[in-house]
Amino acid sequence: MSLNDSIVLITGASSGIGKSCAVKFAEAGARLILTARRKNLISKLAEDLKKAHGTNAVVFQLDVRDHAAVKKTIGDLPSAWKAIDVLVNNAGLSRGFDKLHEGKREDWEEMIDTNVKGLLYVSREVIPGMVKRGKGTIINIGSIAGHEVYPRGNVYCATKHAVDALTKGLRMDLVDTPLRVCTVDPGLVETEFSKVRFRGDEEKAKVVYQNLKPLEPDDVADTVVFCASRPPHVQVAEVIILPTAQASTTMVHRKGT
Ligand code: NDP
Ligand code: 8X3
């Protein structure tokens, strides 16, 4: 299915996987609605994509945890941008690496509010229009952590298990429509993810990707574009994508170890 001129809304497009998705959809000729909290980054991305591919993009500063802002941003989209064809629910994060009984409430709230409630808020505003138009693809960025739990992953893993449940539930709710619901669930991808988890501690973040070749954000974005560009009768329900040196959340082969 051609993505040329499709309208694609990406949450968390300022960095990592979301940013790569923007580039890959732009290369496929899509029009982009880019959202994130760091507006300067998405504005610069939109400028770069305009220069490189002539991409038509609009940017909105949006914190997906802010229900009123999500409702207003999507509700107030100019008419030329309302008919969203593809929604990429990518915005997400982990915070902390504590044992649950030693964990910080603010970390839990941030992960649950972003990864679960934010995804719900955006989906609730975008999907009814897709249903009305009889067309649309929703792609959630889940995680291997939505299939397995790892030590100290407690709440982050719970949020990604929730994404898995929401994806499956939504697919059931939309089974009598032409809409498609997909989840792309990566293992280790080198992005700002671990820096965010460890609140800017570069040393701790580096260790996560040490002595192995992790996925690059483009590897995940290629998969997302693959899902979106299948023929309308094909629904890629779930893709788990891992670095070759990763067999599970806890089994990672690091050179020299
Ligand atoms: P990055 O930290 O590089 O990117 C995260 C993106 O999410 C940023 O663009 C950030 O934008 C956005 N974001 C975070 N919080 C909010 C918020 N409240 N509102 C709006 N946007 C927000 O990490 P990744 O690219 O790795 O993460 C993207 C997704 O991939 C996440 O859902 C993550 O859980 C998932 N994932 C990552 C893996 C990895 O190993 N990296 C593996 C499996 C899944 P801004 O700060 O500007 O708002
Ligand atoms: C991110 C992958 O294993 O670092 O979802 O939690 S992991």
Image: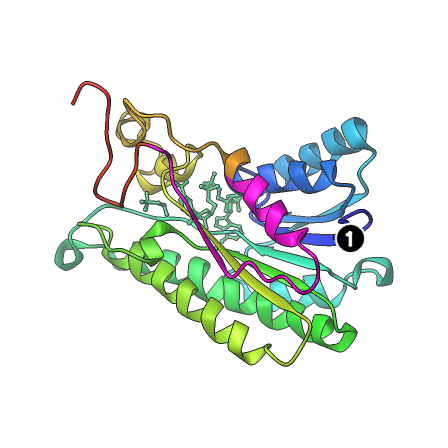
Q: Quadrant of residue 128?
A: bottom right
Q: Is residue 126 magenta?
A: no
Q: Quadrant of residue 62?
A: bottom right
Is residue 38 among the parts visible in the rendering? no
Residue for point 51% across, 41% down:
220
Q: Nearer the viewer, residue 133 or 228?
A: 228
User: By what rule are the colours in the image chosen?
Assistant: rainbow
The image shows residue 58, relative to residue 114, as above or below, that is above
Q: Does the beta carbon at disc 1 come under 8 Å from ligand 1?
A: no
In the rendered image, residue 97, in percent from the top left (x then y), is placed at 23, 46
Which residues are the magenta region? 220-244
Q: How many marks?
A: 1
Instruction: Kindly identify which residue carries mark 1.
Output: 6
Outermost right residue: 80
Q: Nearer the viewer, residue 2 or 210?
A: 2
Residue for point 40% across, 39% down:
193
Q: Nearer the viewer, residue 182 or 102?
A: 182
Taking the image as shown, residue 115 lies to the left or right of residue 221, namely left
Q: Assign the C terminus to one quadrant of the image.
A: top left
Taking the image as shown, residue 44 lies to the left or right of residue 108, namely right
Residue for point 17% across, 50% down:
151
Is residue 243 among the parts visible in the rendering? yes
Taking the image as shown, residue 167 lies to the left or right of residue 212, namely right
In the rendered image, residue 78, in percent from the top left (x then y), is placed at 83, 60
Classify mark 1: helix, strand or loop: loop
